[in-house]
Amino acid sequence: MADASHPRHYEEEFKRRIVQLYENGKPSSQIRVGYGIPRSTLQRWVQGIRNSGSTRAVDNRTPEQNELIALRKRNRRLEMEVDVSEQAAPVFARR
């Protein structure tokens, strides 16, 4: 069973087949029970296919979400640089 530290991975083709079942009228409850897919996952796949034709998260983000992700990544990098500088400062100060 999947958990937070080991999320399940579904192939793109599988996702598309599941969404096609849903679009063809199969009840979501039957799909979810039959394939063991959480409700939120099925909803995200259907919405993604409808919006952009893709179930990939990167294809379904808004420009603001992409900017936030980029800023968080940059912030982590800068924080690491500060940490390294703080650790290296005493070494250079001794010289």
Image (cartoon, rainbow, N blue to C red):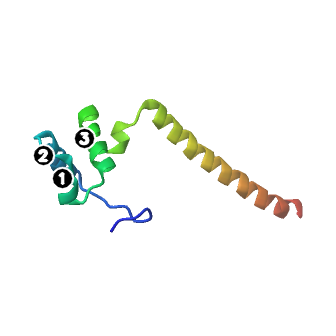
Q: Earlier in the sequence, mark 3 or mark 1?
A: 1
Estimate how packed mark 2 is, as few (under 14), some (14 to 19) or many (20 or more) residues with alpha carbons within 10 Å: few
Q: Which residue is mark 1?
A: 31
Q: Earlier in the sequence, mark 2 or mark 3?
A: 2
Q: Quadrant of the C terminus?
A: bottom right
- The three-letter amino acid code for the residue at tag 1 is Ile
Residue 14 in view of the camera: no
The tag on residue 26 is 2
Q: Which residue is mark 3?
A: 46
Q: CA distance from mark 2 to mark 1?
A: 7 Å
Q: CA distance from mark 2 to mark 3?
A: 13 Å
Q: Find numbered disc 1 in the image and state the secondary structure of the residue it sits on.
A: helix
Give how far across and how far down residue 64 sits, in percent.
Answer: 48, 31
Mark whose residue sits in front, 2 or 3: 2
Q: Earlier in the sequence, mark 2 or mark 1?
A: 2
Give how far across and how far down residue 28 sits, in percent.
Answer: 20, 47
Give how far across and how far down residue 19 sits, in percent.
Answer: 19, 45
- Residue shown at 30%/59% (left/top)? 9
